[in-house]
Amino acid sequence: MTSSNPSKPRVAVYGVGYVGCVTAACLAKDGFDVVGVDIDANKVREINAGLSPVAEPGLAELLSEQVKAGRLTATTSAAEAVAQTEVSLIAVGTPSAADGSVSLDALRSVIETIGQNLRLHDRPHCVVIRSTLLPGILEETLVPLLCEASGRELGPELRVCNNPEFLRESTAIADYYNPPYVVFGVTDDWDANLVLSLYHNVETRSFVVDSRSAAMIKYACNAFHAVKVAFANEIGSLARCLGADGHDVMSLVCEDDKLNISKAYMKPGFAFGGSCLPKDVRALTRFAELEALRIPVLGSLLPSNEAHLRRAISRIEASGCRRIGMVGLSFKAGTDDLRESPFVTLAEYLLGKGFQLSIYDPGITLARLHGQNLAYVDRHLPHLANLLCDSPDALVDASDYLVISTKIGDDQPAITDSELPRLDLRRALALPDLATDDSAQETVPAGKSGS
């Protein structure tokens, strides 16, 4: 392949199914010289004849145009493709294995083949993985395989990144040019201009993140889409049983772009609580039980909430510290509402296990608690008055480990500057990014031990 545009890298797209075929055609349209690579000779013949091997609106015409223009060809030979290109873009399938795990057979095969053929050349090469893969697979499996097969190490001569796709069948070409964003995940610190240049005609935001986060973004998006479908279906089923119109209900739910269709509640952190969410979820799930209506998504909400609480408890217990200081007790900042606050539940558990507990929450004044709020506290933390500290300094002095559940201002240096090990359940502090699966941050300063 002689480049028709020497200023642009030549690209090989491995796997010319729905994703690969659209990607190859769009790259060619944008002026890149592209070779599609596939083990299926029939697909290769169809592309070289200007025909689309997959059904996708607008793709047949686009493929035909690019083949006629000489910017798009196809081959079954990886050796030929590697010899002619500077970028290998992999779009082979990663289907489910029999046990539900990700099958990497095709991906491993392509990676190894590319690596073996790179031994025959000394040009720098960049491998971009478009296939969906779990976080860690790139770093722990594919990069070592590629390095071993190619005889190269990651560096200027061999770059690897992942580039998750957000294409939907039947609207794939439109999605290619108008995605929510373009994401590149890099395995080390390198200039991503080469891969960013692949999308010079795509008008959207571009993000370069670590490779594990990039891989997780694709799964998070697809899981969220699945949750939305399942949620809407379950609300529809409940509405039908209750004599309401599920379509009208969900239409109005979607009209709320302040809370419902927005960034609200979309930060990972700790359990939900308060006077509304737990009781209303409980009411819906109990109604469904009485009606013998299965709503497994809604039914999983309270158990999921409990699981987050248990994870926090496990971390605190694993710290080995017995004097625990809690910053915040109400279910959210800016209120003194303690009803069904997960932090009240956490405090109640710790006291029951013999921990020495101190609490600082500037929003809580016992004399101002009334009605159900006061009754809830009396039932779950009857000795709260003995636990409350009147200042951050007093809390820190009484503690060996801090559990932070509310926003802390810069005017409280006793907490923000404390060298005590701490568990930040809601990323209330600007701490080093040591987040784990639920994005609570656990920090043990140098010279300190959290266990």
Image (cartoon, rainbow, N blue to C red):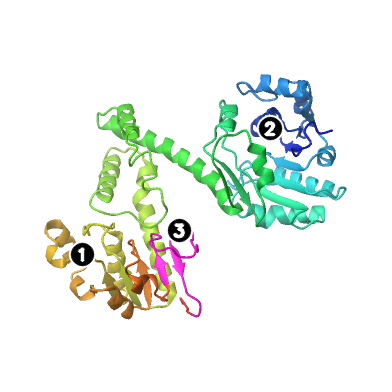
Looking at numbered disc 3 in the image, what kind of residue is underneath it? Ser
The CA span between labels 3 and 1 is: 26 Å
In the image, what residue occupies the spot 44% across and 64% down?
441
Considering only order in the chain, which callout, 1 or 2, is on the residue closer to the N terminus? 2
Residue at mark 1: 364
Looking at numbered disc 2 in the image, what kind of residue is underneath it? Leu
In the image, what residue occupies the spot 29% across and 27% down?
245
Residue 163 spot, x, y in % from top left: 62, 44
In the rendered image, the vertical position of residue 224 relative to residue 54, given as above or below: below
On the rendered structure, is 204 left or right of 61? Answer: left
In the image, what residue occupies the spot 79% across and 36% down?
6
**Which numbered tag is attached to residue 27?**
2
Residue 129 in sight in this render:
no
Residue 437 among magenta residues: yes
Q: Residues within 10 Å of mark 3 (few under 14, many from 20)?
A: some
**Among the 4 quarters of the image, the one containing residue 311:** bottom left
Residue at mark 3: 439
In the rendered image, the vertical position of residue 108 relative to residue 166, given as above or below: below
Q: Are marks 3 and 1 in contact (CB under 8 Å)?
A: no
**Among the 4 quarters of the image, the one containing residue 345:** bottom left
**Magenta segment boundaries in residue numbering:** 422-447
Residue 231 spot, x, y in % from top left: 38, 38
Main secondary structure found in the magenta portion: loop
Looking at numbered disc 1 in the image, what kind of residue is underneath it? Ile
**Given this view, does label 2 or label 3 mark the residue nearer the observer?**
2
Residue 34 spot, x, y in % from top left: 75, 33
Mark 3, secondary structure of its residue: loop
Q: Nearer the viewer, residue 141 or 179?
A: 179
Mark 1, secondary structure of its residue: loop
The CA span between labels 2 and 3 is: 37 Å
Residue 211 in sight in this render:
yes
Q: Residues within 10 Å of mark 1 (few under 14, many from 20)?
A: some
